[in-house]
Image (tube, rainbow, N blue to C red):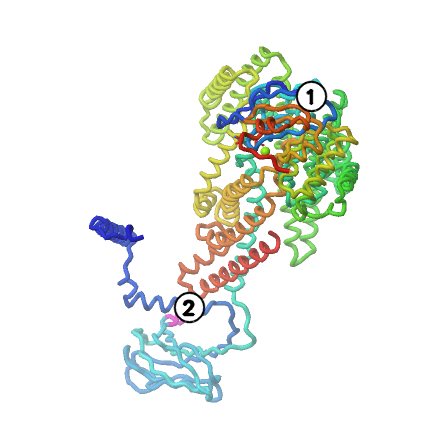
């Protein structure tokens, strides 16, 4: 203790130097962030601050209907030649009326305005109606008057610089609240937008979660490290995927073309929506036996494969028919549901989503199926065939796979930039790809396995980390450019940001699960998929739920401000009102944001407590 | 018949866990594997079902070369080899019955597992196995609600689901108190005697070895230093196995 505290010149000097350095850093920081406290003290700033604060304290949520009493009194500016009082209508003293003394004057003169018989306790402005421009009303400065219990008021006003020989008027517009209070238009708009905001957050969270879950497995080192595949397997998988995807896409087109004529008939639609699930379920049951005791004979496997293909075609058909049915129901419903027409519209949108997704699903399913089928063939050939045959196969298949991958990349570049020079976008990439594949096949031994798992892991991780460092707001700007201003851009931006950040968080959870149960399940002969379902998933459900809630919280917050860059939601309204200096409306929106954020926070923490 | 020939394992960091280990286990034998911790017992057992890939050597089981098996073949081999672990290795948040059913995954079509389904026969079988180890009433409990002894019985039931021809037990009683240890060992013994299942069991306490094992393999720093009947372990052998400073207890 004592030793450490021994005073020393050197130590003090060092302390001094550190303090100096901190001061310099702070000073520089003040300089570049333009910290200026005198600005806060200046009169105009304080005034506007007071104005804004007062407006904020009165959010524009509730208003009354108002009854107006509008009474004009004639006045001459300047006084007519010949002097004397202005001849005008003699006011009806049973009704509200104004008395001006004097009833003429020069600009700048002060006159007295007295009002009688108005409704008691009302208030409103005095205005000047110029004779040459009767549609106009001229504000007279501090001109709000209030009536007393008897409906009488007195006020002085300064005549404006509006000279005219015509009759001009002083107008009193006294207003009174009538009826019960009701919501303002601002409140209604705010409600609409806050609903949009919450759903924006909800959609982004759901979509993000759906994609983040599979990504998180690919980005988990402990799951990916053991994944190694033989060269033949890799080559055939790489070839199988795009070919399968093309086949799947074409199959969907084919099915929808073939069935288009019968799909128009409602009875057929209903029948097929009812029947297809049975066909699919029984087909799958037969083609995928529950038990896997011994390998069935080849012919049976082939028949099962054919049945599976038929089942897939049937389910595509079923999906398309379902889309048609849902669209019909949606259309019918939106006609009769009145205020709930949005349900019909929702169904219609769902059917559109189905229609758009079916080709994609078909392509993905067929790609995955053919990829893993080819991969299996590759694995078995590299295990069973003689080494030289495997080597030759590797050389051939790897060149094809490489050419295919770079060729597809080239086609993508071509499509994006429309270069229109196939030599550069197709042939050269294919040649290079083929060369790379050949090189890979030459440098590896025939039966070697490559760490495909780690390659996928590294790519996924890099992508996740890279995208995660881009703020959701910046993504929103990009998407606003891509799909236009509106909530859709916001959903895309928040959704993408949710995918990458949840993907990272989830994968860290996967990496920290207990390895014991995994090992035990692997030891029973379970394959990778089964190991993940029975060993990994149960362990990660609670943290996944809790991270999803947490992300939902963040998304609600983000969705309130994503409108600032055009991403939809309440931020758009808020920003507009701030720019229009409409602080009372802005206040209503800020209040709404505060309420929503606080209640979502409360709900999610409650759910987290209960379920995790 | 399980034949281990010149088995060597060097871990990635360079640790030599097993050196030239060779022995044979006839069908239906109860073999104890003993040795200090770090002597390579777990590594040896894990090489047999390839949870750990041996660096060199051969493992033949009924004539089939486990070390050369392809992934598909490995799935078929593993599902006949049950494994019981020191720390039970149950999935804590899953139900007991689900943990037991997991023993059936090697026989279940992965597409069905994707939907979290097991054939009806397997569910019945799982209940039977739980009855056999005496905790059928806990089937619907979460695994982590069970005591250590109960959890290990779930582990045994899971291994039994595999219809195993061989059970690898890696210090199955090391985290249990002695009374429970005997009840678990009796279950293994019963399985060994009635079902004629070969058992390879690594153990810490010599009295358990004397009580349950037909034969003993002793490892020291990854080498076999003793092989024979438990009765043959005299004081000299004991010091060979456990080191000069070791004292016999119990
Ligand atoms: N996964 C591993 N990676 C590196 N070294 C390991 C690993 N597992 C075990 N070892 C080492 O191998 C040796 C044998 O370990 P192990 O088989 O667990 O022995 P035992 O089960 O008899 O205690 C020890 O030195 C241990 O540190
Ligand atoms: Mg051990």
Element type at marker 2? helix
Instruction: Find the residue positioned furthest to the front.
Output: B235
Q: CA distance from mark 2 to mark 1?
A: 85 Å
Q: Nearer the viewer, mark 2 or mark 1?
A: 1
Answer whether residue B168 is magenta in the image. no
Instruction: Tell me the residue at 65%/40% (across/down).
Output: B90
Please rate how many residues cluster around mark 1, counting C-alpha atoms within 10 Å: few if below 14, some from 14 to 19, many from 20.
some
Circle 2 sits on which residue? A55
Q: Ligand 1 closer than 8 Å to the CB at disc 2? A: no
Nearer the observer, A95 or A588? A588
| Residue B61 disc label | 1
Q: As rendered, which of B16 and A268 lies closer to the eye? A: B16
Q: Residue A419 appears at what percent x and percent y?
A: 44, 27
**Place of residue A277 in the rendered image (x, y in percent of width and height, measured from the top left):** 75, 39
> What chain is tagged by disc 1?
B
Observer able to see residue A275 = no
- Per the picture, the main secondary structure of the magenta-coloured stretch is loop
Q: Which residue is at a point 54% across and 63% down the rendered structure image? A: A188
Q: Is residue A368 above or below residue A134?
A: above
Q: Quadrant of ligand 1?
A: top right
- The region drawn magenta spans A133-137
Name the outermost residue toward the top. A388
Reply yes or no: does residue A136 show up in magenta: yes
Residue A439: % across, % down: 48, 17
Question: Horizontal and vertical percent for residue A259?
Answer: 72, 34
Q: Which mark is residue B193?
A: none
Query: Circle 1 — which element?
Result: strand
Query: Residue B110's quadrant in the figure?
Result: top right
Q: Is residue A308 left or right of residue A139?
A: right
Can residue A156 be seen by looking at this rendering? Answer: yes
State whether discs 2 and 1 lie on one chain: no
């Amino acid at each position: 203790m004592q030793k450490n505290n021994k005073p020393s010149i050197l130590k003090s000097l060092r302390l001094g130097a550190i303090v100096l350095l901190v001061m310099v850093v702070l000073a520089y920081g003040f300089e570049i962030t333009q910290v200026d406290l005198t600005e806060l003290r200046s009169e105009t700033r304080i005034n506007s601050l007071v104005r804004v604060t007062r407006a904020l304290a009165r959010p524009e949520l509730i208003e009354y209907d108002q009854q107006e009493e509008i009474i004009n009194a004639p006045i001459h500016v300047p006084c007519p030649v010949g002097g004397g009082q202005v001849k005008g209508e003699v006011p009806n003293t049973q009704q509200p009326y104004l008395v001006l003394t004097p009833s003429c004057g020069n600009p700048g003169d002060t006159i007295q305005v007295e009002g009688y018989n108005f409704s008691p306790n009302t208030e409103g402005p005095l205005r000047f109606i110029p004779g040459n421009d009767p549609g106009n009303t001229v504000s007279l400065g501090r001109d709000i008057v209030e009536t007393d219990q008897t409906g009488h008021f007195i006020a002085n006003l300064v005549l404006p610089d509006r000279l005219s020989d015509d009759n001009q008027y002083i107008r009193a517009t006294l207003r009174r609240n009538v009826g019960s209070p009701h919501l303002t238009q601002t409140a209604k708009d705010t409600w609409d937008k806050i609903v949009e905001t919450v759903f924006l957050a909800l959609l982004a969270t759901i979509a993000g979660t759906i994609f983040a879950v599979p990504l998180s497995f690919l980005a988990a080192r402990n799951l990916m490290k053991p994944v190694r595949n033989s060269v033949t397997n890799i080559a055939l998988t790489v070839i199988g995927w795009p070919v399968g995807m093309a086949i799947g896409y074409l199959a969907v087109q084919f099915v929808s073309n073939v069935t288009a004529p019968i799909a128009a008939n409602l009875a057929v639609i209903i029948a097929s929506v009812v029947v297809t699930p049975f066909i699919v379920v029984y087909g799958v049951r037969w083609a995928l036996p529950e038990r896997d005791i011994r390998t069935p004979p080849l012919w049976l496997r082939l028949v099962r494969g054919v049945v599976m293909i038929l089942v897939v075609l049937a389910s595509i058909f079923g999906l398309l028919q379902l889309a048609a049915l849902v669209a019909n129901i949606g259309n019918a419903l939106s006609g009769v549901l009145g205020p709930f027409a949005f349900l019909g519209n929702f169904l219609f949108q769902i059917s559109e989503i189905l229609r758009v997704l079916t080709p994609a699903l078909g392509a993905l399913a067929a790609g995955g199926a053919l990829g893993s089928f080819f991969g299996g063939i590759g694995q078995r050939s590299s295990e069973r065939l003689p080494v030289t045959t495997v080597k030759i196969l590797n050389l051939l298949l790897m060149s094809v796979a490489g050419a295919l991958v770079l060729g597809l990349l080239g086609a993508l570049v071509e499509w994006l930039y429309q270069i229109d020079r196939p030599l550069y976008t197709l042939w050269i990439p294919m040649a290079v790809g083929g060369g790379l594949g050949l090189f890979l096949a030459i440098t590896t031994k025939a039966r070697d396995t490559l760490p495909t798992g780690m390659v996928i892991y590294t790519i996924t991780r890099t992508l996740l980390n890279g995208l995660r460092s881009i703020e959701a707001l910046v993504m929103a700007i990009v998407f606003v450019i891509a799909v236009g201003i509106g909530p859709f851009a916001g959903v895309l931006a928040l959704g993408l940001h949710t995918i990458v950040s949840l993907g990272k968080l989830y994968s860290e959870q996967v990496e920290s699960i207990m390895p014991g149960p995994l090992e035990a399940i692997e030891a029973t002969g379970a394959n990778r998929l089964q190991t993940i379902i029975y060993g990994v998933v149960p362990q990660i459900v609670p943290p996944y739920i809790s991270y999803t809630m947490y992300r939902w919280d963040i998304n609600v917050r983000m969705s309130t401000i994503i409108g600032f860059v055009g991403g939809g939601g309440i931020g758009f309204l808020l920003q507009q009102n701030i720019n229009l200096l409409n602080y009372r409306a802005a206040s209503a929106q800020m209040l709404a944001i505060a309420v929503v954020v606080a209640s979502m926070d409360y709900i999610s923490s409650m759910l987290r407590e209960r379920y995790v | 018949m399980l034949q281990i020939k010149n088995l060597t394992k060097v871990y990635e960091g360079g640790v030599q866990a097993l050196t030239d280990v060779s022995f044979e286990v006839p069908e239906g034998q109860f073999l104890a594997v003993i040795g200090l911790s770090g002597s390579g017992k777990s590594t040896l057992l894990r090489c047999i079902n390839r949870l750990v890939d041996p660096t060199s050597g051969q493992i033949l089981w009924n004539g089939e070369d486990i070390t050369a098996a392809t992934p598909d073949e490995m799935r078929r081999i593993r599902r006949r080899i049950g494994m019981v672990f020191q720390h039970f290795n149950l999935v804590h948040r899953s139900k007991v019955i689900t943990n037991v059913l997991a023993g059936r995954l090697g026989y279940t079509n992965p597409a069905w597992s994707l939907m979290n389904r097991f054939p009806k026969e397997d569910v019945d079988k799982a209940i039977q196995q739980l009855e056999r180890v005496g905790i059928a009433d806990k089937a619907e409990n979460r695994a982590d609600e069970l005591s250590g002894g109960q959890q290990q019985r779930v582990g045994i039931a899971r291994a039994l689901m595999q219809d195993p021809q061989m059970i690898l037990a890696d210090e199955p009683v090391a985290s249990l108190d002695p009374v429970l240890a005997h009840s678990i060992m009796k279950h293994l013994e019963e399985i060994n005697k009635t079902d004629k299942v070969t058992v390879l069991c690594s153990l810490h306490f010599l009295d358990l070895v004397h009580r349950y094992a037909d034969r003993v393999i002793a490892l020291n720093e990854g080498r076999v230093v003793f092989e024979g009947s438990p009765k043959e372990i005299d004081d000299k052998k004991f010091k060979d196995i456990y080191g000069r400073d070791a004292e016999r207890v119990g």
